[in-house]
Image (spheres, helix red, strand yellow):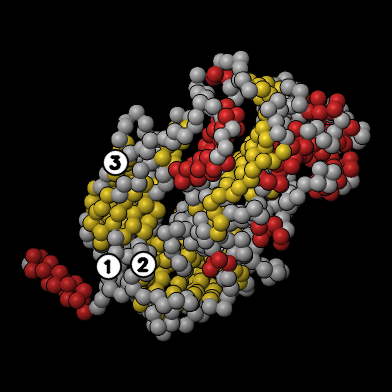
Amino acid sequence: MNFKLLFFVLLALILLNCKTEKQFTAIDDNKNSVPLSVAYPVSNITVDGEIEDWDTTIPEYTIDALLENKMDSPDDLSAVFKVGFAEKERSVYIAVIVTDDDHQLDNSAASLSDTQDQCLIYLDKTHSPNGSGVNVYSFNELYKDVDDASTSWDLFARNANWDDVEVASKRGENITIYEAKIGFDEPIDAGKMLGLDFMIYDVDHPNLEDDLTRISWRKSDGKTNVPFKLGNVLLAKEPIGIGTIKGHLKWEKDSLGLPINKIRVSSDLHPSYWVRQDVDTTGYYEVSLPKGTYAIVPEWGIYNGDDQQYKVKKNPIHVKVKPNETLVADLEIEVEKPLDLILDKGILLTDPTDKYDQIDTFINAYIDFYDIPGVSLAIIEDGKMSYHSTYGVQNTYTQEPVTSETIFEAASITKPVFAFTVMRLAEREIIDLDRPLHEYLPFEEIEYDERYKKITARMVLSHKTGFPNWRSGKMELLFEPGTEFGYSGEGFEYLKRVVEHITSKEIVKTLNEEVIRPLELKNVFFEKSDHLFKVVAHGHDDNYPHKVSLPNKAGMAWSMHTEAKSFSDFAIALLKKKGLKEKTYSDMFYKHTVTDKYEEMKSEDWKSFFGLGVQIEKTPYGTTFGHGGNNGDFKCEFKVYEGLGKGFVIFTNGNTGGELAYKALEQFLITGKVDFSQ
């Protein structure tokens, strides 16, 4: 037999077959890249949970990112999807094929739950580079549900419903097919990119409490809470060429070497072609994209290092992606010069006639440099609020401005308000600050450690309980209660439960009786309400907004919401010693605990302590009281110099607000430039 002749005959047949039918192939995604799929035109598809009417040339993509694993064996669950679009129908079609030996439904349930198998489809229709919202559609054979997007930062995403969505699911042997058709208000055509992802829930043993396996296309949780957590799908009419860009981020100064964990790659021609790509700890990135020219820049400009934040210049490099080729593109990182706006003396001490204009200029400069979305500010002078202003936006996506009515998360600034309540109760002997709390109400989760029975309200308020700030798993004591400082939100939550128990009231009612009404505070909230939702700002990470998340129940370590003008009334009340007896204030402001805040300075002029629920500081300008707050996407601070009668309240709604709230503002207003590293 002539094997060489046979080989060429077979090759010719293969090539002939390729020419007679258009071939679409799936993209082999690099595991470090944001996954990319391609949707090709489809027609005559009926959404019925069957895929015989899908063109067999439409490529499939694997869903295999394991988020939660309770599988009996590694091959227990697998899934693929295919996606197409119908331009005239303004619709995207999706089919998900799940292979699973055990398929669980719950006929007794009123709706979808974690106790049954289901498919979740995540879709970002707009795919805006500014971070548009995401909708999620969940369904199986029995139920369907659309995620509540009413708290989204994206007004368009808030309106999601089933009006333009068809779904169907069908089980056969060991395969379940989930099928969907999702309509669009605007025309869709080739060249558009969408955000798309999936979550497959698999339950094998419904009688077990924790038996949920979850797989996804892109390995990420919280896909609807913040933008940029999905994979991408590109609409195309013809097979497209895919190329790869890879490279390293190289610092202008090797000594800096701060980690940049994301870059943005954007098409020069198609606004919807963009990818927010992860960068590993070595500075390496790799991403697959359709052919074309792209700009690459650092995704986020603010990075922490050497106890301060740096701003990175967003100098783009331009590259050309060619089909089936890999391009190496290294990105050189340069750092902006830090702001230098703080004078040798604080502006509230030098007291120029235009000081409030200078304060506005200072705040706006920090907002611009550090990409702080919004700020609420109040200045205290001569024992009263002398100035109040708001800056920036409450939502970077909609650009809705911060106003005097905008409410911010106060985070740990909740603690002094709760402490004031406890001191009021102690004055009337409703609670004894030195009686072990377990005598009022045991803490079952820590009863295995007898040492917890030493914990008192005084230890909670001065952060000497031995509890962690927040538990990670099992509750435990980190040290002998009463022996050292250890900041703890857990302690405040335990004390809240004790107060609720001994007063037989929910904590919000007690707060109203002991703080809000006596001090005549306005715009102070601890739990969610329709009004609060209407006026609250969105938190932001890296200048991109989050969903609003309001507390169902008040937490005394973190849940207060307010704004600077209103909260200044509380700060001024403490300054003027309102609402409590003089002896009680002496106890509250006594230096019960030493902290290590200024330890590196090795200076007797700067010391930090905790009183009962308030932070006390010794400075060259006198004693201060106050507290900071940090919920991650909200950062805030209030501080009052007792002897000067001067201080400030500031709330920000971004993760970079700390550089202003915790450091720069106090120096600009009061102390002048201070080198805390000395």
> Which residue is the site of mark 2?
234
Q: Is residue 346 left or right of residue 306?
A: right
Indicate the amino acid at tag 1: Ile
Gap between marks 3 and 2, in whole Å?
A: 29 Å
Q: Earlier in the sequence, mark 1 or mark 2?
A: 2
- Where is 196 relative to 569, above or below? below
**Do the residues under discs 3 and 2 have CB atoms within 8 angstroms?**
no
One can see residue 69 in this view: no
In which quarter of the view is residue 564 placed?
Answer: top right
Q: Is residue 606 left or right of residue 342?
A: right
Q: Residue at x 24, y 53 (%)?
A: 319
Q: Earlier in the sequence, mark 3 or mark 2?
A: 2
> Which residue is the site of mark 3?
332
> Which residue is the site of mark 1?
240
Indicate the amino acid at tag 3: Glu
Residue 455 image offset from top left, x and y in percent: 79, 28
- Where is 242 relative to 598, above or below? below
Q: Residue at x 41, y 71 (%)?
A: 83
One can see residue 256 in this view: yes
Gap between marks 1 and 2, in whole Å?
A: 10 Å
Indicate the amino acid at tag 2: Leu
Residue closer to the observer: 63 or 321: 321
Q: Is residue 318 left or right of residue 445?
A: left
Residue 506 image offset from top left, x and y in percent: 83, 48
